[in-house]
Image (cartoon, rainbow, N blue to C red):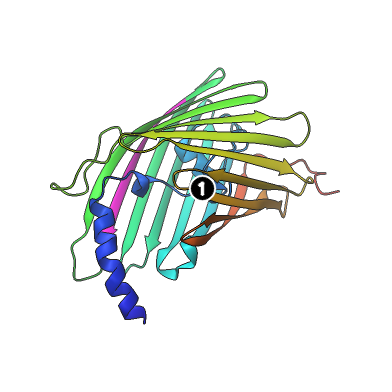
C-alpha cells in the first residue's frame, strides 16, 4: 500500500515543483497553522523573526526553537525545523533550517537567514532563502534561492508588519515559470486585559487575496490559548502555549482543512540571556 501511495505522490510532487507558487519558500512558525498564519508580533518566536523583525526580543536575548509538523496526518509530509534568533543592541539576526518529506523519497529542504536593524519604533530586515527539492536516488535535485524584505512598526498597543518575499522571482528549473513575489501585511492589537487580536492579508499576482484573523488569550501566567482562521484556502485552527519554566515554553497548534483534514505542529522554545517570564511567574 505504501508503494502505491508513493507512486501516486511522485508525479504530484514533481508538478508541485513546477507550479508557480510561493508556498515552497514559506517557513513554518510555532503558532502559524493555529492562527491562520498570522503572527503575534509582540511575542515573537525564532521562526516568526525569520519572517518579520520586531522589538519583542530583548537585547542580549537568544531564542532557540525546535519543532515538527505533520501535515494532513500524512507521515510522508512530516516537517521538522530548527531556528534561532538573537539581538545585539539594535541588530537582530535569525536563522532557520527545515525539511519536509522523506530523504529517500521526496523532500523539501529550506534554509533561511534574516538580518534586521531596529531604529526607534521601526525594524528593517533583509532575508535570503535557499530551497532544495530531492526525489530520491533516481532523480536529480533542483534548487532555487529567494530574497526578501521585512518591516515592522509598533506604537502603544498596535504592531504592524510587512513581509515581501521572492522579490527576485526565482525559478526552480530553467524551464519552469518564475515564482511570483508575495507581499504579506500583518497587524496586532493588544487589548487592555489578557488578549491580543492578529490579522494578515497576503497578495500575490494571479492569486486571490488571502485574509486571516487570529486571537491569543492569556489564561494564566503559565500559558495561553489561541485560535484563528484563514481564507484561500479556508482553514481553521487553534492551540496553546505552556510555560514549563521561566525561560522555556511548549507550543501546540493544529489546523483543519475541510478537504485534506487536520495538521499538527509541536514546538519547544527556550530563551537564553533574558528571562521571558519573571521569577515569580509560577507562584
- Density class for disc 1 (Cα within 10 Å; few <14, some 14-19, many ≥20) is many
Which residue sits furthest bottom?
A: 1
Residue 273 higher or lower than 4, as above or below: above
Which residue is drawn at the image coordinates 13% and 48% (left, top)?
A: 175
Q: Nearer the viewer, residue 230 or 218?
A: 230
Q: Can residue 34 be seen in this view?
A: yes
Q: Is residue 17 magenta?
A: no
Q: In this view, does 129 lie to the left or right of 220?
A: left
Q: Position of residue 127 (x, y in %)?
A: 37, 35
Which residue sits furthest right?
A: 283
Q: Is residue 128 magenta?
A: yes
Residue 104 higher or lower than 68, as above or below: below
Q: Nearer the viewer, residue 93 or 74?
A: 74
Instruction: Find the magenta span and give its range.
Output: 124-135
Secondary structure, magenta segment, majority class? strand
Q: Is residue 39 left or right of residue 225?
A: left
Which residue is drawn at the image coordinates 33% and 57% (left, top)?
A: 108
Q: Nearer the viewer, residue 277 or 250?
A: 250
Quadrant assignment for the N terminus: bottom left
Q: Where is residue 51 in the image (x, y as percent from the top left)?
A: 46, 38
Q: Mark 1 points at which residue?
A: 29
Instruction: Give the structural element (helix, strand or loop) at label 1.
Output: loop
Location of residue 128 by image quarter: top left
Amino acid at each position: 500500500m505504501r508503494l502505491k501511495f508513493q507512486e501516486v505522490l511522485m508525479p504530484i510532487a514533481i508538478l508541485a515543483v513546477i507550479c508557480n507558487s510561493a508556498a515552497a519558500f514559506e517557513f513554518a512558525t510555532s503558532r502559524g497553522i493555529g492562527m491562520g498564519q498570522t503572527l503575534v508580533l509582540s511575542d515573537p518566536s525564532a521562526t516568526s523573526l525569520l519572517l518579520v523583525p520586531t522589538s519583542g526580543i530583548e537585547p542580549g536575548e537568544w531564542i532557540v526553537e525546535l519543532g515538527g509538523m505533520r501535515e494532513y496526518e500524512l507521515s510522508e509530509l512530516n516537517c521538522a525545523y530548527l531556528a534561532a534568533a538573537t539581538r545585539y543592541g539594535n541588530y537582530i539576526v535569525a536563522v532557520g533550517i527545515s525539511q519536509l518529506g522523506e530523504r529517500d523519497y521526496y523532500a523539501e529542504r529550506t534554509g533561511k537567514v534574516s538580518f534586521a536593524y531596529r531604529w526607534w519604533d521601526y525594524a528593517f530586515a533583509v532575508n535570503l532563502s535557499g530551497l532544495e527539492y530531492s526525489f530520491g536516488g533516481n532523480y536529480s535535485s533542483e534548487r532555487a534561492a529567494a530574497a526578501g524584505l521585512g518591516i515592522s512598526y509598533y506604537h502603544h498597543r498596535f504592531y504592524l508588519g510587512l513581509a515581501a518575499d521572492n522579490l527576485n522571482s526565482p525559478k526552480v528549473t530553467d524551464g519552469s515559470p518564475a515564482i511570483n513575489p508575495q507581499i504579506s501585511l500583518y497587524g496586532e492589537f493588544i487589548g487592555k486585559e489578557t488578549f491580543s487580536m492578529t490579522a494578515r492579508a497576503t497578495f500575490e499576482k494571479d492569486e486571490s487575496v488571502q485574509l486571516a484573523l487570529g486571537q491569543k488569550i492569556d489564561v494564566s501566567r503559565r500559558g495561553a490559548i489561541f485560535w484563528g482562521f484563514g481564507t484561500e484556502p479556508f482553514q481553521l485552527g487553534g492551540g496553546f502555549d505552556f510555560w514549563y519554566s521561566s525561560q522555556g515554553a511548549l507550543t501546540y497548534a493544529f489546523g483543519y482543512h475541510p478537504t485534506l483534514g487536520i495538521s499538527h505542529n509541536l514546538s519547544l522554545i527556550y530563551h537564553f540571556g533574558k528571562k521571558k517570564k519573571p521569577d515569580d511567574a509560577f507562584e
